[in-house]
Amino acid sequence: MRDQELFQPQDYLTPKWYLFKNSKLGKVYDTIPWGQLSECLPKENRGPGAPRWFSAQGMFGLMFLKSYLNLSDEKLIERFNTDWSLQLFCNKLLDDNQRIKDKAILSRIRTYMSDNTDWQQLQEVLIHHWKRDMHNTHVLLMDATC
């Protein structure tokens, strides 16, 4: 019966999602190959212990936002807690009463990503996806923070 639905549930647009997708940040969001980037990190561990707060997309999203908005870790978390467009960018929409209280979460995410990201695969994904928009491809620049 599900195959006969005109729209799949994930296709429904909420007003926030519609506003986000039509914003400047939403347009940046659309240029990023989230699925392929997520494959550059190991699949979420479903073993014992607390579940991961951010998905792979959320972790990459936070790193993009940190650079894009030029914010410190503390300021990014402060903005994330109060700005649903940043939450949508990271695929982690908080409930009205939910806040990130852990001041060191971004540092731990950076450490996790630096230890577990397949950097060769990540570069190939981004090059393949953005190649038509790239100029001066003979120059290599890399951010040392992540």
Image (cartoon, rainbow, N blue to C red):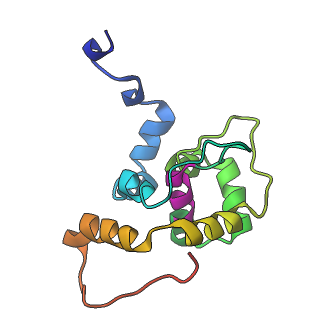
Q: Residue furthest top?
A: 1
| 94 vs 85: above or below | above
State whether residue 76 is above or below residue 87: below
Image quarter where the C terminus lies is bottom right
The image quarter in which residue 7 lies:
top left
In the current view of this chain or complex, which residue is farthest to the bottom?
139
Residue at 70 percent across and 58 percent down: it is 77
Residue 4 sits in which quadrant? Answer: top left
Instruction: Name the residue rendered at 45%, 83% in the picture.
Output: 142
> 91 or 24: which is nearer to us?
91
User: With 87 as the anchor, is 100 left or right in this view?
Assistant: right
* Total numbered labels: 0
Question: In which quadrant of the rendered view does residue 115 lie?
Answer: bottom right
Q: Residue at x 23, y 71 (%)?
A: 131
Residue 60 forms part of the magenta stretch: yes
Direction left: furthest residue:
132
Asked whether residue 146 is drawn in magenta, I would say no
Q: Is the magenta region chiefly helix, strand or loop?
A: helix
Image side of residue 121 versus residue 138, left or right:
right
**Measuring 80% from the left and 52% from the top, which residue is drawn there?**
101
Q: Which residues are magenta?
A: 55-63
Q: Position of residue 10 (x, y in %)?
A: 41, 29
